[in-house]
Image (spheres, rainbow, N blue to C red):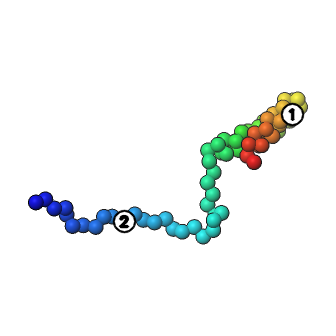
Amino acid sequence: MITQPDHAEPTRAEPPPVEEDDQNTVVNLGRIAWLGTVGACLIAVVILVLEGYYGYAAVTFAVAIAAGINLL
């Protein structure tokens, strides 16, 4: 007759409890991508305005607004 060794299974460590519900929030990859797109567009707008390309800056700003809508 074969018997199993008599030992306890290892217990998993529990993560510490979160004090408040909104303390740790999850940011999904899609939201991070849209934030990066908005940030890059706004940086490009500043550079384009400083160089005098106002039309391209306006179009890039419109793209930033359109990307920002996805964050709502």
Residue nearest the observer in this picture, 56 or 65: 65
**Amino acid at circle 2:** Thr
Image spot of residue 34 (x, y percent): 70, 42
Q: Which circle's residue, 2 or 1, is located before the other in the chain?
A: 2
Q: Nearer the viewer, residue 36 or 11?
A: 11
Image: 51 above or below 35: above
Instruction: Bin the neighbour count of mark 2 within 10 Å (Cα to Cα): few under 14, some 14-19, many 20 and up.
Output: few
* Residue bearing mark 2: 11
Quarter that holds the N terminus: bottom left
Task: Inspect this view and state whether residue 1 appears.
Answer: yes
Q: Quadrant of residue 69?
A: top right
Identify the residue at horizontal 75%, vertical 39% (top origin). Answer: 67
For disc 1, the marked residue is: 58
Task: Tell me what residue is drawn at x 83 percent, y 36 percent.
Answer: 62
Name the residue located 74 percent from the left edge and 42 percent from the top edge: 70
User: Which of pointers 2 and 1 indicates the residue nearer the eye?
Assistant: 2
Is residue 54 shown above or below 28? Answer: above
**37 left or right of 62 in image:** left
Q: Residues within 10 Å of mark 1 (few under 14, many from 20)?
A: some
| SS for dot 1 | helix
Instruction: Tell me how far mark 2 sits from mark 1, CA to CA.
Output: 59 Å
Towards the viewer: 61 or 51: 61
As drawn, the residue found furthest toward the left would be 1
Location of residue 54 (image quadrant) = top right
Q: Is residue 31 left or right of residue 46?
A: left
> Quarter-wise, where is residue 33 in the image?
top right
Choose between 36 and 34: the one closer to the eye.
Answer: 34
Residue at figure coordinates x 86%, y 33% from the top left:
58
**Residue 7: x and y, percent?**
24, 67
- Local secondary structure at mark 2: loop
- Label annotation for residue 48: none
